[in-house]
Amino acid sequence: MTPEFVVGFARQAIEMTLTISLPMLGIGMAVGIFVSVLQAATQIQEMTLTMVPKIVAIFIALLIAFPWIMDKMVNYTRDLFLNLPNYIK
């Protein structure tokens, strides 16, 4: 195992993590900005008003994106296990 291989392997794992988490992070950010603008317009400064819509939106996004996430993870894990003999060399 060369240092380049280890760095490439770590980079691939980080890219997969970011790719999988991107839909939930994007939805959370969009809902957070919308709620912040709504709070600024109405001057309602309630902390639960910011958290509850984000939690619900992220949960719904997770339910919708779950098949895609599982497909990406299964393919990544399958490739990892199939190439394991090549990695050991």
Image: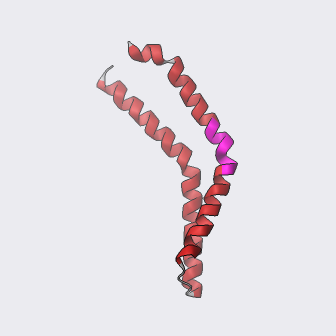
- Estimate the x, y position of residue 30 in percent, counting from the top left: 58, 64
Q: Is residue 44 magenta?
A: no
Q: Give the answer, above or below, for where 76 lies relative to 66.
A: above
State the residue lying farthest toward the front: 48
Q: Quadrant of the C terminus?
A: top left
Q: Is residue 69 magenta?
A: yes
Relative side of 37 to 84, left or right: right
- Estimate the x, y position of residue 2 in percent, counting from the top left: 31, 21
Q: Residue at x 56, y 57 (%)?
A: 26
Magenta residues: mostly which secondary structure?
Answer: helix
Q: Give the answer, above or below, for where 44 lies relative to 36.
A: below
State the residue lying farthest toward the bottom: 43
Display colour scheme: secondary structure
- Estimate the x, y position of residue 24 in percent, counting from the top left: 58, 54
Could you say which quadrant of the image residue 86 lies in? top left
State the residue lying farthest toward the left: 3
Q: Quadrant of the N terminus?
A: top left
Residue toward you, 52 or 8:
52
Q: How many marks?
A: 0
Specify start and end residues of the magenta stretch as a single range. Answer: 63-70
- Estimate the x, y position of residue 65 in percent, counting from the top left: 66, 47
Q: Residue at x 66, y 44 (%)?
A: 66
